C-alpha cells in the first residue's frame, strides 16, 4: 500500500488567496442553513449574487450548477457497495470501525447536490470518482489520519486569514485527507466545527470527517468533474501526482474508479489520467 499523499498544491493555494482577497468581509459564519432563496457560498456564508451563488456554491440556487436531478445517492451507495470497499481493509485498521455508510449519508444531508448533476450516468460517474479517490486516500477506509502526518509541518504561516494554532497539526485527516490550515479554517467555518483549534475533530467524528471530504469535493473537485476522472485527481493532489509526479498513485486511483464504475454499470468516460 502506497503511503498517503499530502496536498500542498501551489495552484490551489494561489486560488484560495485570490478568492479570499476578492470576497467582501462578513460578520459571522453560517452552517449552510440558508433560506430557500439564498446560496451557501464556498466559504459557508448565506447570501445572493456571484460571491455566494458562483464558483464553489454548496447549496441553494447556485449559478454555477444546473438544478439537481432526481437521483437518490443512497440508492446508488448501497450498504453492499460501501461494504465492498471497507471489507477489504484489515481488521486492525483504525478506519474499520470509524467510516460507515450511515455517517456518509448523514453528512450528505448538508450537500444535497452531490452526485445529482446531469444524467443518471453522470451521477454514477461522480459517485464512483468520489469513492475512487477516497479509497486511495484512506487505503480502502483503513486510515483516518495520514501516515506519519503528525511529524510533518502543514502550517502555511503566510495565510493570515486562517492562522495556525502552534499547538495543533493540520495534517491529512478524513476520507479526502484534509490538510493545511488554509483548508481546515474554511472547512470548519462551513461545516460547523473549529477547524483551526480543533482539527482533530475530523479524526474523532465520522460525520464531520465525511463532511470535510464532501466540502472539499464540492468546492474544489465538482467544478472539474465533467472533464474526466483525471481532472479530479489534479484537483486533489495536482503536481504531486499529475504530469509524471507519481504515475503509480494516479494509476491506483484510476483502478478504483473504473472498478466502481463497473459495479454501478456505467462507462468510466474519457480523460482518466492526469
Image (spheres, grey):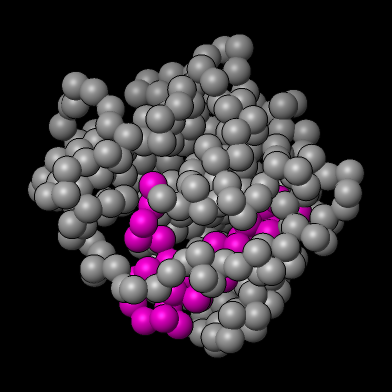
Locate residue 166, reporting x and y percent.
57, 12
The answer to if 256 sits in the magenta stretch is no
Q: Look at 18% across and 57% down and name the residue there.
A: 61
The quarter of the picture where the N terminus appears is bottom right
Q: Residue at x 37, y 21 (%)?
A: 160
Q: Identify the image quadrant of the C terminus.
A: bottom right
Q: Residue at x 37, y 81 (%)?
A: 119
Q: Toward which corner of the image does residue 136 lie, by quadrant?
A: bottom right
Report whether 252 appears left or right of 231: right
Image location (x, y in percent) of residue 233: 55, 62
Question: Where does the image place residue 78, in percent across and percent down from the top left?
Answer: 60, 68
Vertical order, 62 against 205 (above or below)? below
Q: Residue at x 61, y 55 (%)?
A: 101
Q: Position of residue 121 (x, y in %)?
A: 45, 83
Which residue is at the front of the view, 42 or 121?
121
Is residue 131 rendered magenta in the image? yes
Q: Between residue 13 and residue 244, name the one nearer to us.
A: 13
The span shown in magenta is: 110-139
Task: Name the quadrant containing residue 112.
Answer: bottom left
- From the viewer's perspective, is residue 3 above or below residue 184? below
Answer whether residue 136 is visible to the viewer in this image. Answer: yes
Point out the residue furthest to the top here. Answer: 167
Q: Main secondary structure of the magenta part?
A: helix
Relative side of 163 to 141, left or right: left
Amino acid at each position: 500500500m502506497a503511503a498517503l499523499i499530502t496536498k500542498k498544491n501551489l495552484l490551489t493555494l494561489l486560488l484560495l488567496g485570490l478568492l479570499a482577497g476578492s470576497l467582501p468581509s462578513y460578520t459571522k459564519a453560517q452552517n449552510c442553513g440558508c433560506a430557500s432563496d439564498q446560496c451557501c457560498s464556498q466559504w459557508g456564508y448565506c447570501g445572493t449574487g456571484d460571491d455566494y451563488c458562483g464558483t464553489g456554491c454548496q447549496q441553494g440556487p447556485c449559478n454555477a450548477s444546473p438544478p439537481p436531478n432526481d437521483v437518490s445517492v443512497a440508492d446508488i451507495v448501497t450498504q453492499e457497495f460501501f461494504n465492498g470497499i471497507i471489507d477489504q481493509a484489515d481488521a486492525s485498521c483504525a478506519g474499520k470501525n470509524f467510516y460507515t455508510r450511515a455517517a456518509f449519508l448523514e453528512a450528505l444531508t448538508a450537500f444535497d447536490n452531490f452526485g445529482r448533476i446531469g444524467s443518471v450516468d453522470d451521477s454514477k460517474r461522480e459517485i464512483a470518482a468520489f469513492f475512487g479517490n477516497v479509497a486511495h486516500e484512506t487505503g480502502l477506509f483503513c486510515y483516518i489520519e495520514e501516515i506519519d502526518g503528525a511529524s510533518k509541518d502543514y502550517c502555511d504561516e503566510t495565510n493570515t486569514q486562517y492562522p495556525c494554532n502552534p499547538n495543533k497539526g493540520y495534517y491529512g485527516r478524513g476520507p479526502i485527507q484534509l490538510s493545511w490550515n488554509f483548508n481546515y479554517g474554511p472547512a470548519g467555518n462551513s461545516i460547523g466545527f473549529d477547524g483551526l483549534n480543533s482539527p482533530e475533530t475530523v479524526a474523532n467524528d465520522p460525520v464531520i470527517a465525511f463532511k470535510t471530504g464532501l466540502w472539499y469535493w464540492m468546492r474544489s473537485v465538482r467544478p472539474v468533474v465533467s472533464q474526466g476522472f483525471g481532472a479530479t485527481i489534479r484537483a486533489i493532489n495536482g503536481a504531486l501526482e499529475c504530469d509524471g509526479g507519481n504515475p503509480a498513485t494516479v494509476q491506483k486511483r484510476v483502478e478504483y474508479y473504473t472498478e466502481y464504475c463497473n459495479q454501478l454499470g456505467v462507462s468510466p468516460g474519457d480523460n482518466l489520467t492526469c
